[in-house]
Image: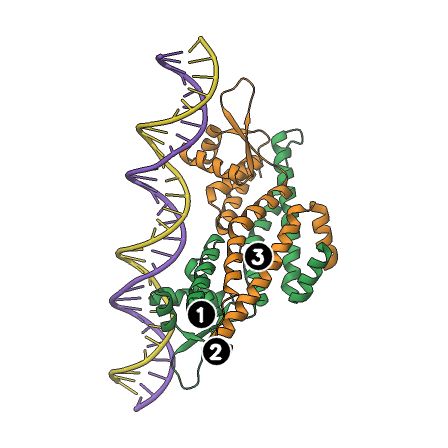
Chain colours: A green, B orange, C purple, D yellow
Amino acid sequence: MELAAAKLKFIEAWGKLGSEWGINRTMAQVHALLLISAEALTTEEIMEQLSISRGNANMTLRDLIGWGLIEKQHKAGERKEYFFADKDVWNIARQVAKERKKRELEPVLKVLNELSTVNGDEKDPEFKTFQKSIKDINKLAGNVDKTLETMLKADESWFWGSILKVFK
Amino acid sequence: MELAAAKLKFIEAWGKLGSEWGINRTMAQVHALLLISAEALTTEEIMEQLSISRGNANMTLRDLIGWGLIEKQHKAGERKEYFFADKDVWNIARQVAKERKKRELEPVLKVLNELSTVNGDEKDPEFKTFQKSIKDINKLAGNVDKTLETMLKADESWFWGSILKVFK
DNA sequence: TTAAACTTTCAAAAATTATTGAAACTTTAT
DNA sequence: ATAAAGTTTCAATAATTTTTGAAAGTTTAA
């Protein structure tokens, strides 16, 4: 396979994975494009390579900056803005984990904690079932949260080394 | 808060989380409803409690069975089908992990492996960048895959015990 | 059989989400 | 000042995803 074809295939696969996990397809594709580009790209170049409009490109780039996955770059003597992606895959994973934890896991943990204080008739099977499910989900979510917390601070080789060694 | 209000709140929160993670909101809500119900419910009851149509309820229940999260139950001397959810939260987590691994992670790993065999000019920065990103993502995805593989076979307390002990 | 009870299907409609593109805005150089 | 270069906004449109509901299908009991 040619490099050009391989790039397209990667961009497509990354976009599909993103959309399956609740990340806008275009956003995942722009990220993929920048991730495999040696050079920073302009909005024009991104628009052209992915056949998307200026408005879409602009909003998507803004979102990616908001996710901490790409940055603007200014080249000396040039008006245009260039964009480049952090190429460190472990940083990317941590950044995504950090944002999704904050935006999605934490609000749910908050609700679960509220719901675990609800009290009712201990003899009512409906109440008991509710209480147990909430408690169990809360425990699981708490463990996920702690693991993510560790991941956010950890060095890649230490993190996987520790996990995979235990699991052998 | 009343049990009834708490149930609604949980169903809403679970639906929202699902939709943020690429799972149809209604499917997550039906799952939530069955998870906190002590008794198995009929299609009628689910339709009524969530205000959804018969067609939607039927398709969603079929999907949930496909994900291995709920089962049909037949009560002696009754025509109607009842549905109930596995209440073991660790089983649920493993079942979701298993399905998403199969449906989403594995196809991506396949593409990444193909892409890591692409060859090109070792002096071309574009090629080098592509190659390195693919290699790094592949390694990360492989580690995630191994961890999920362990999780699928593991007992809950052993799994979290091992992880959280290492992380202290 | 047949008819009532129940389940499934799927084309059409509704709802949601993503994208466009042109106008407004900002910055820089002269 | 002003005009060119570049960026941002957002209402309108398009694409996608979800839901409906009625018809077709199935099962059971009499």
Q: Quadrant of the N terminus of chain A?
A: bottom left
Q: Which mark is residue A3?
A: 1
Image spot of residue A17 (x, y percent): 48, 56
Q: In x, y percent, where is residue A94?
A: 59, 63
Residue in the image at 62% along x and 44% along y: A137
Do the residues indicated by labels 3 and 2 lie within the same chain of the protein? Answer: no
Which type of secondary structure does the marked residue at label 2 adopt? loop
Marks 1,2: beta carbons within 8 A: yes
Q: Quadrant of residue A118?
A: top right
Is residue B44 something that shows in the picture? yes
Identify the residue at image location x=52%, y=70%.
Answer: B131
- Residue B127 is labelled as none
Spatial separation of the CA atoms under disc 3 and disc 1: 35 Å
Indicate the secondary structure of the residue bearing disc 1.
helix
Between residue A121 and residue B17, name the one nearer to us. B17
**Chain of the residue displaying label 2:** B
Q: Is residue A140 above or below residue A123?
A: below
Q: Amino acid at mark 3?
A: Lys
Q: Quadrant of residue A125?
A: top right
| Disc number placed over residue A101 in the picture, else none | 3
Residue at disc 3, secondary structure = helix
Q: Which residue is mark 2?
A: B124
Compared to residue C8, the image places residue C19 above or below, namely: below
